[in-house]
Image (spheres, grey):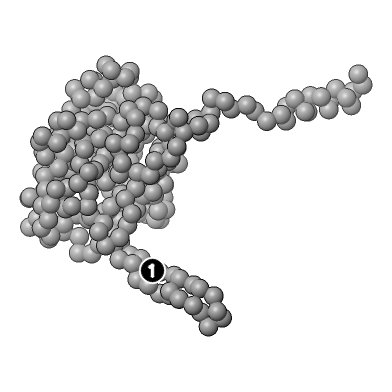
Amino acid sequence: MNGYIIITVLCLAACKPAQHEDSVFSSGKWIDLTYSFSEQTLYWPNNATGFKLDTQANGITPAGFYYSSNAFSAPEHGGTHLDAPVHFAQGHQTADQIPLEHLTGEAVVIDVSEQALKNADYLITVKDIEAWEKANGTIPDNAIVLFRTGYGKFYPDAKKYFGTAEKGAGAIPHLHFPGIDPTTAEWLSTQRKIKAVGLDTPSIDYGQSKDFKTHQVLMGKNIPAFENVANLDQLPLTGTYIVALPMKIKNGSGGPLRIVGWVRG
């Protein structure tokens, strides 16, 4: 075999497409974890405005073809959205600075709905996580941790989801929905290596929080959060790959989020 033939054989071997039978995307289905943005989108009660879509064009043009175009406006935080670390941690990552690696990856789903649906002020505990790990194994390094409280079934009913349908600053004391206990946030961020957290409520802090300590703890360590996540009841406890891409707002403290999960078949 001459040198040319040897080089050709080696090249063909190296260039042969890799076999990925065990690829994370070899078989399965996508689950949409995002609520559509519309006039029904829920925002914190003291937001002066919500999501607005203005029609700029919709119809047949003088040239004879159909054309539509809209303009939208919305607060950063509302509906299915991202909380960037800078939201509660000065000088930390803004929405456009979060590494893509922190917004994508394997996820675990910790179901606390049995407790949370009985107590609107439920705080997710370290014991909840330890019980999950006893049944499913230790949370893997670099996982995205999603908490299922069961409150997603109430969206977009503000009274059931927020605990009040009132608007304005006066509604804040009447907010009642579950969240992550600050001691749990501290434990997660120090005893486990996680990329991000998310849940199916308006905030990672519970409705009655006055200092948003869970936000402070996680975002102080550059751990972003996904809030108002939809359809967590359609995800298995393990075996989901998450893609959570927010609007890339320069210097943003957060923004609308399109989050989806690939569930392996």
Q: Position of residue 85 (x, y in %)?
A: 31, 44
Instruction: Please tell me whether residue 135 is drawn above or below residue 211 in the rendered image.
Output: above
Label 1: few (<14), some (14–19) or many (≥20) C-alpha neighbours in 10 Å: few
> Outermost residue, bottom direction?
62
Can the viewer see residue 209?
A: no
Q: In the picture provided, is 4 more to the left or to the right than 51?
A: right
Q: Position of residue 16 (x, y in %)?
A: 71, 29
In this view, the residue in front, 162 or 168, is 162
Instruction: Please tell me whether residue 112 is drawn above or below residue 177 in the rendered image.
Output: above
Q: Residue at x 29, y 36 (%)?
A: 233
Disc tally is: 1
Q: In the picture provided, is 124 more to the left or to the right than 22?
A: left
In this view, the residue in front, 10 or 112, is 112
In this view, the residue in front, 153 or 81, is 153
Q: In the picture provided, is 49 more to the left or to the right than 172?
A: right
Circle 1 sits in a helix, a strand or a loop, which is it?
A: strand
Q: Residue at x 30, y 60 (%)?
A: 38
Can the viewer see residue 112?
A: yes
Q: Position of residue 159 (x, y in %)?
A: 12, 52
Q: Residue at x 45, y 37 (%)?
A: 29
Could you tell me which quadrant the C terminus lies in? Answer: top left
Q: Position of residue 183 (x, y in %)?
A: 18, 29
Give the residue number, with chain letter if any, for mark 1.
Answer: 71
Could you tell me which quadrant the N terminus lies in? Answer: top right
Q: Residue at x 33, y 54 (%)?
A: 36
Q: In the picture provided, is 100 more to the left or to the right than 121?
A: right
Residue 133's image quarter? Answer: top left
